[in-house]
Amino acid sequence: MIYRILHPTKELKGTLKLSSSKSISNRLLILKQVGRLDTEVLNLSTSKDTQTLLNILSVINTQTVFDVGHAGTAMRFLTALFAATEGERMLTGSTRMKERPVKELVDSLRKLGADIHYTEKEGFPPLLIKGKKLSGGKIHVDSGISSQYISALLMIVPLLDSGLEIELVDTPVSKPYIEMTLRLMQEFGAHVHWTGKGISCTNDPYTATHNKYTIEADWSSASYLYSLIALSKPGSSVTIEGLNRDSLQADAVCREIFAQLGVESTFVKGGQLQLKKQDTLLSADFGYDFSDCPDIAQTLAVTTAALGMSATLTGLRTLRIKETDRILALHTELKKAGIQTTITDDSIRIIQGPLNSIPDAPFETYDDHRMALAFAPLALVSDYVEIKAPEVIEKSYPEYWDHLKQLGFRIEPASSS
């Protein structure tokens, strides 16, 4: 399937209600499972990642083989959970998931006594996990690969024989996501301390301190609406419902980042966030370190290119091992639109535009939801764009195409493939 996307006027008006945070949803599901909590979770994410995790947890005691598909968070969180839960289970995923490393997490769990075996390639899924009671103690973890390794280890601490102390080797990537995990754990009674390069946590059980927990809307999804406003005509405005001003989510930083790209955002009555297009950019040269918020790097790469800016995006090393090699994918697809880039293992440099052509061929998405989400706004600076495999957005933002239609976009099948 290929979608052709266009907007007749390039001016946006509307009010949208975003789905809830995938990151918070997935963590809460694990905390509930570990603590056997009866807390009612409201506004759970509709993303495919969260629904995959929810479905697996619902049959954790009745099945032995579990397929997470493309859901990297589920793979990492379930690896730790299964290792500390009695029973033998096989954990697998998509072809791409089998190329995404889990060695650092598996090695850390093995130090706690876990019985985990690779069934295909060493260091990668699928995993045969023989769950049992694990010890606690002190371990060293390379925190420069994925914050989800740290979060996965922390959340299972109540299942360990004793508390856990993690010494972080290297500067943590996506540090705010570790902080999110710790704050959620604390909300359910955990005692945690993060000082310098060490995180310690007692193995006290989680407690149902909330009868109900309402999850806030997803700031990662909001970043694409910021991009739409940045590329729209002056006078455009979109109001978003469900976002928190004081958010647990790292991607809430897009409020500050997009202010440099001509988007004014203001919280108004009822907690709604209003985005307005401004006439001027603060600078023609953009630079930012995305170490703490890599999920919005693709959004900013495409947006700055479309605005005719030069840009240097750094802190991107984790993008190489995502649903696709996102740095290479950005380089390849932006080149189709006439944008020159230089890339390294950790960065992408966008040579000042303007974007001068939209290809007749569709933009590839590489089984990566964020490629589709990030490139669709280019319809606002061209007659139209075509996006291949548009269904990939179900992974994180399944309402995206419907939301674009609400904002006046026309979306129609271009052809089959």
Image: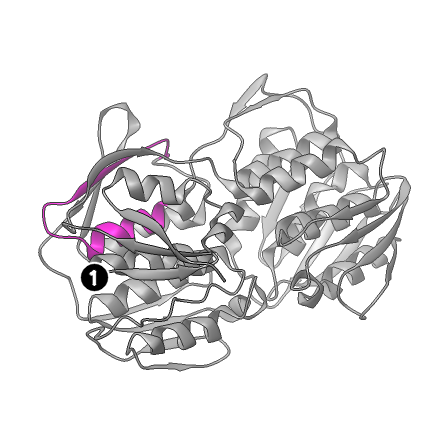
Q: Quadrant of residue 185?
A: top right
In the displayed structure image, the side of residue 79 where residue 300 appears, left or right: left
As drawn, which residue projects farthest toward the top?
211
Residue 180 visible somewhere in the drawing: yes
The percent coordinates of residue 402 (x first, y second) are 36, 39
Residue 256 visible somewhere in the drawing: no
Location of residue 127 with respect to 249 vertically, above or below = below
In the displayed structure image, the side of residue 139 where residue 196 appears, left or right: left
Magenta includes 413? no
Task: Name which residue lies at 85% across and 40% down.
Answer: 85
- Number of other residues with Cα within 10 Å of mark 1, as a class: few under 14, some 14 to 19, many 20 or more: few
Q: Nearer the viewer, residue 224 or 189?
A: 224
Q: Quadrant of residue 351?
A: bottom left
Location of residue 369 with respect to 87 vertically, above or below = below
Q: Give the residues in magenta.
A: 222-244
Task: Name which residue lies at 35% across and 78% down.
Answer: 335
Q: Quadrant of residue 38?
A: top right
Would you name the residue on which mark 1 appears?
383
Magenta includes 241? yes
As drawn, which residue projects farthest toward the front?
415
Task: Name which residue lies at 52% across and 36% down.
Answer: 46
| Colour mapping | one colour
Location of residue 288 with respect to 129 vertically, above or below = below
Q: Nearer the viewer, residue 163 or 255?
A: 255
The percent coordinates of residue 273 (x first, y second) are 27, 36
In the displayed structure image, the side of residue 385 where residue 391 appears, left or right: right
User: For numbered disc 1, what is the local secondary structure?
Assistant: loop
The percent coordinates of residue 128 (x first, y second) are 86, 55
